[in-house]
Amino acid sequence: MDLSIGSPLAIGLILGVVIITAALLITFERRLLGFWQERLGPNRVGWQGSLQVVADMIKIFTKEDWIPPFADKFSFVVAPGIIMSVVLLSFAVIPFSPNVGVIDSNIGILFVLAMASLGAYSVMLGGLSSDNKYALLGSLRAAAQMISYEVFMGISLLGVVALTGSFNLRDIVEAQVDGWYIVPQFVGFVIFLIAGVAESHRLPFDIPEAEQEICAGYHTEYSGMKFGMFFVAEYVGLVLISSLITVLFFGGWLGPTFLPPILWFVIKALSFVSFFILMRAAVPRPRYDQLMTYGWLFLLPLSLVNLLITGALILSV
Amino acid sequence: MIKLVADTLLSQVRTLWMVFVKLFKKKDTVEYPDQQPYMFPRWRGRIILSRDPDGEERCVACNLCAVACPVDCIALQKGEMDDGRWYPEFFRINFSRCIMCGFCEEACPTNAIQLTPDFEMAEYVRQDMVWEKEDLLIDGTGKYHDYNFYRVAGKKIEGKDKGEALNEAVPVDVRSLLP
């Protein structure tokens, strides 16, 4: 039983737990959304709807896996695999607790950002290969949104990197022993939160898949488990963004010692997951051009100013 | 500009808070099969045929309900018993066409056809929506307990001649000149 960083058992456990958590989140989100809309949500299957995810999985596995005859088969099949593997790979650098993790990489943040950029390919390929106008519109929107939001997603993290002096996520967590980065980097946190929502295309920034406007966007033509991959990958991405916020701004596994570090991490990450679901329940979706204007003309300058001020303070102290 | 940003931010935070508080509010959902709704007695639901207090069928096959029905979902055939009473030989309601308007109940002169508060009428086979007299007929009197058509009507049947009904005057013999 070797559970040290990077052991096969640890890797398997992390992968399994992350995927199961993402699947369970589907039920969790539906119930929470229900509560926030003053209804009950699915509570029929199992105790309080706890087995809803099993029912959903049975449904999604037994559905016809239809590939449209007009689609480009190869990229159509590959696209859902890309996003799934990319978000799962991002978990490699997340430090769950002092001795749980996959790699102790000194380019942790860069790796996560790189993987997030690769995720754009999946969405673009999925939409393009479907040969469907809604899917094409969705993938166009996704590409534009992800490119514009990645810019200041990276810049907003530079404040944290500058304060720590390292790209290593473990170093970043350990540097927060004296105080979480939410205090000195509050602006960075808000920008990263918004960029993270846009990056994982969750509501209110789910413009690539806006149901009311363009069906389901880039995965309009997908069915069965291929759609399921997109769907679960979205939730894995949600967990990933929540974990990143926890690690970068809320001290990762750090917390009072009456709970084990891993539990502190889980509690913090889950509360951010709930916050994302709350945003979905409460905030309306902006128009497409509003989102772009907001990103380029407001958040990008703001993140640059934040970085400048952080740098100036570090140099002057 | 700064005021606009601050107002927008505050508005978003306020929205999030107001939605979050709903977590602890009472939910609007009615969990239907577990939690049955109160059905008002005069609710217009499944149609039944009732019996009079003596246990006989109330329906006299007058066809008024079939005429009043706007979607023509009622079909029946008159039959006559040896004692002079009329009755429906068959009485068929196609509930897949019925719109629960209640016109048949209003048209019925004998209070035989009545609408009940039952609304759970889903079927898997379409043909099962067609109900025959055996399915429609109930053992009770429905909403009107004391009413018996033949006891108050002038119709002559065996054991009750003209003028013998409740509150009925003896018929005038038009051939007699006596006042």
Image: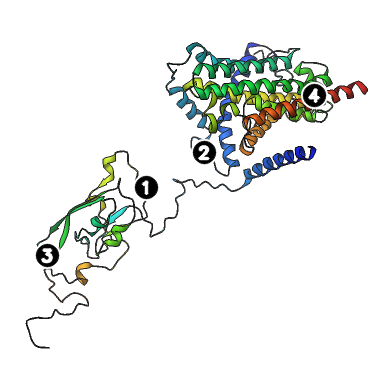
Q: How is the image coloured?
A: rainbow
Whether residue B141 is visible here, answered yes or no, is no
The secondary element bearing badge 4 is classed as helix
Q: Is residue B15 left or right of residue A71?
A: right
**Nearer the camera: disc 4 or disc 3:** 4
Q: CA distance from mark 2 to mark 4?
A: 47 Å
Instruction: Look at the numbered disc 2 and give the secondary structure of its residue.
Output: loop
Q: Label 3 belongs to which residue?
A: B84
What residue is rendered at 78% in x and 28% in y? A302
List the residue tagged with mark 2: A43
Q: Amino acid at mark 4?
A: Leu
Query: In the image, what residue occupies the spot 58% across and 29% down?
Result: A25
In the image, taking residue A94 as reference, residue A20 lies left or right, namely: left
Contact between marks 2 and 4 (CB within 8 A): the answer is no
Q: Mark 1 = which residue?
A: B120
Q: Percent x, y for residue B27?
A: 56, 46
User: Label 3 sits on what residue type?
Assistant: Gly
Subunit of label 2: A
Closer to the eye: label 2 or 1: 1
Q: Quadrant of residue A155?
A: top right
Quadrant for the C terminus of chain B in the image:
bottom left
Q: As rendered, which of A114 and A106 lies closer to the eye?
A: A114
